[in-house]
Image (spheres, rainbow, N blue to C red):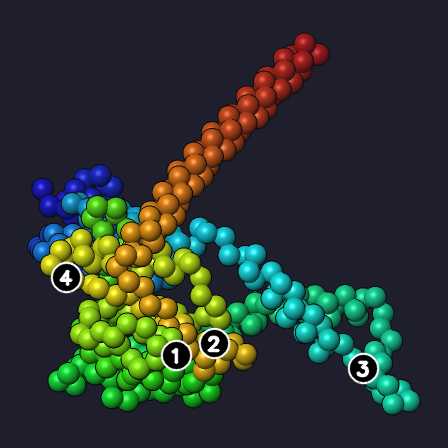
């Protein structure tokens, strides 16, 4: 029995609801079913074309395709690492930008050479204060746009080199952002590539670990040389295969180490002969204060194991939290069902009592 026939048998309304699945080719029917109801991208294959992954762009979630075409959720690297709370780092900054916006919005006037706040009603002040409250979100959205534009420029430039340059070297940037901050960030990344004679092997690659069942997107693999800056490269080396991860951020966070360690684990698990010697986390400054600033973080093989254990801790905690939340959700649903049943029983009993009382009367 084909997958389409199985769906038809179970649903009873298969012909009407999903007419395009009733095709002669089971493989084509399965693909149309997944595309229509899964809202996922094209396939990503791993382990000699034996494991298929799909990616939901809107929800940023990964799914493994089961034998019957079912989409099985897979933990994503970025979401897994986000379980480590970083809000304490953002709280003082959020308070600062809120105060700055409040001061910009306050109406002022010049009185005898002194800037004073104009008289305000409490309602007017409340309106201004509430507007200032969203300052951190405005800044985050702006920074996100800058980081995305810089990353996109670098990605396009690397793809151009992979397709057109015999040595896979980025000779110049393509699609440079019009935004000055984003352009500065991308230029800093280009300068690092030039200084390290970076020869790209791949970029924006999907990874999957069969052993630990997680997936993600690796920024790239490349062969690198050391640069002349001892602060960046204290040791001289040449032609090292390196895992590279771009980060548009105003500071370095240890969860970045967890992420890149997970990428290395998945990649070398699938391809054991791959000798990834180094890992580079390349921070591109994105705020007004950090615009154009570049900070490389060089990780060597002896640091990898501890970083990967950090990722596994996040992965285990994520799965525990998901399991417990699902259990709590199930318990709440059970309680709601019981209470609903109790209300219906009470209502029916009351109705019978009213009928009895009416008969007695």
Considering only order in the chain, which callout, 2 or 1, is on the residue closer to the N terminus?
A: 1
Q: Nearer the viewer, mark 4 or mark 2?
A: 4
Mark 3, Cα crowd under 10 Å, few <14 / some 14-19 / many 20+, is some
Tag on residue 164?
Answer: none
> Quarter of the image containing the N terminus?
top left
Considering only order in the chain, which callout, 1 or 4, is on the residue closer to the N terminus?
A: 1
Considering only order in the chain, which callout, 4 or 3, is on the residue closer to the N terminus?
A: 3
- Which percent across, then down, holds residue 110? 85, 87
Considering only order in the chain, which callout, 3 or 2, is on the residue closer to the N terminus?
A: 3
Residue at image mark 1 = 150
Q: Residue furthest right?
A: 112
> Real-space Cα distance between discs 1 and 3?
38 Å
Residue at image mark 2 = 286
- Which percent across, then down, holds residue 276? 20, 63
Residue at image mark 3 = 108
Element at label 1: helix
Closest to the observer: 349 or 294? 294
């Amino acid at each position: 029995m084909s997958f389409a026939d199985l769906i038809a048998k179970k649903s009873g309304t298969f012909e009407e609801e999903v007419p395009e699945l009733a095709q002669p080719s089971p493989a084509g029917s399965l693909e149309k079913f997944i595309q229509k109801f899964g809202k996922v991208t094209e396939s990503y294959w791993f382990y000699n074309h034996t494991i298929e992954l799909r990616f939901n762009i809107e929800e940023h979630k990964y799914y493994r395709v089961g034998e019957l075409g079912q989409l099985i959720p897979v933990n994503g690297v970025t979401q897994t690492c986000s379980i480590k709370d970083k809000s304490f780092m953002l709280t003082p900054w959020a308070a600062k930008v809120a105060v700055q916006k409040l001061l910009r919005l306050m109406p002022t006037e010049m009185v005898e050479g002194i800037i004073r706040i104009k008289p305000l009603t409490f309602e007017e002040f409340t309106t201004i204060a509430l507007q200032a409250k969203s300052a951190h979100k405005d800044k985050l959205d702006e920074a996100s746009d800058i980081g995305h534009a810089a990353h996109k420029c670098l990605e396009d430039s690397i793809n151009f080199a992979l397709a057109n340059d015999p040595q896979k070297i980025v000779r110049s940037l393509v699609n440079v952002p019009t935004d000055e901050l984003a352009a500065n960030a991308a230029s800093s990344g280009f300068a690092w590539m030039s200084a390290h004679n970076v020869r790209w092997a791949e970029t924006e690659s999907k990874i999957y670990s069969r052993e630990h069942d997680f997936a993600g997107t690796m920024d790239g693999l490349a062969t690198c040389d050391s640069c002349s800056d001892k602060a960046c490269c204290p040791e001289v080396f040449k032609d090292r295969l390196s895992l590279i991860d771009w980060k548009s951020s105003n500071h370095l966070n240890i969860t970045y180490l967890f992420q890149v360690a997970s990428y290395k684990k998945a990649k070398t698990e699938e391809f054991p002969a791959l000798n990834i010697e180094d890992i580079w986390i390349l921070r591109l400054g994105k705020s007004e204060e950090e615009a154009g600033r570049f900070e490389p973080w060089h990780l060597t093989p002896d640091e990898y194991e501890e970083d990967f254990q950090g990722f596994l801790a996040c992965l285990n905690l994520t799965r525990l939290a998901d399991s417990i939340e699902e259990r709590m959700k199930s318990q709440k649903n059970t309680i709601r069902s019981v209470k609903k049943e109790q209300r219906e029983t009470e209502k029916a009993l009351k109705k019978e009592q009213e009928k009895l009382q009416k008969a007695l009367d």
